[in-house]
Image (tube, rainbow, N blue to C red):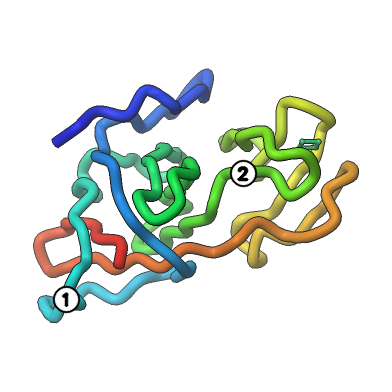
């Protein structure tokens, strides 16, 4: 498993997941054993405590992808490239929001990464993931 060094979070960092490919978002992904063909394992839920996030590289486009464990079985995944000017957003566990360090753009991961502050013109792009019965996290 390749370690990603893109995680810039000051706390609750999650940097143990491997390079990955991935596409949409799932808020509370189902735990199942039917993993789609081509899905790539990026880690395990045990590596990502509640109210924390980590960043992996999306192999489809090379963009950073942020995986957030909100609480319980609720996870979110988004392309971490800010829709304003392309900086990488970071998860702020105190606000429970994704914040862009460049111009203060702020996104709400619990509501489709909608813009809640700053200049970004649109939400972050969702990425699809699933979690199996063993807690392994996959992106498709
Ligand atoms: S690049 Fe993110 S707010 Fe400007």
Q: Nearer the viewer, residue 91 or 123?
A: 123
Q: Specify which label sits upstream in the sequence, 2 or 1.
A: 1
| Residue 128 image label | none
**Residue 136: which quarter of the image?**
bottom left
**Residue 109: which quarter of the image?**
bottom right
Query: In the displayed structure, does residue 42 sit left or right of residue 85?
Result: left
* Image quarter in which the C terminus is found: bottom left
**Percent of width and height locating residue 127:** 47, 63
Where is mark 1, residue-wise?
37
Q: Is residue 23 above or below residue 80?
A: below
What SS does tag 1 mark?
loop
Q: Nearer the viewer, residue 49 or 84?
A: 84
Work out which residue is located at the far right of the displayed protein and give it. Answer: 119
Query: In the displayed structure, does residue 39 sit left or right of residue 56?
Result: left
Q: Residue at x 28, y 42 (%)?
A: 19
Q: Residue at x 22, y 66 (%)?
A: 39
Q: Is residue 7 above or below residue 22?
A: above
Where is mark 2, residue-wise?
81
What SS does tag 2 mark?
loop
**Percent of width and height locating residue 79:** 54, 52
**Percent of width and height locating residue 49:** 34, 40
**Percent of width and height locating residue 56:** 37, 41
Query: In the displayed structure, does residue 90 sit left or right of residue 45?
Result: right
Number of residue marks: 2
Alpha-carbon distance for marks 2 and 1? 26 Å
Q: Quadrant of ligand 1?
A: top right
Work out which residue is located at the far top of the displayed protein and give it. Answer: 10
């Amino acid at each position: 498993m390749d370690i990603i060094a893109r995680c810039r979070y000051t706390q609750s960092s999650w940097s143990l997941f491997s390079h990955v490919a991935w596409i949409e978002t799932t808020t509370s992904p189902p735990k199942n054993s039917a993993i789609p063909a081509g899905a790539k394992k990026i880690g395990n839920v045990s590596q990502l405590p509640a109210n924390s996030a980590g960043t992996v590289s999306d192999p489809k486009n090379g963009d950073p992808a942020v995986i957030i464990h909100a609480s319980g079985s609720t996870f979110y995944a988004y392309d971490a490239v800010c829709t304003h000017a392309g900086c990488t957003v970071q998860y702020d566990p105190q606000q429970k929001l994704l914040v862009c360090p460049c111009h203060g753009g702020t996104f709400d991961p619990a509501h489709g990464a909608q813009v809640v502050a700053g200049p970004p013109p649109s939400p972050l792009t969702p990425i699809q993931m699933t979690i199996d019965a063993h807690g392994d996290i996959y992106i498709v």
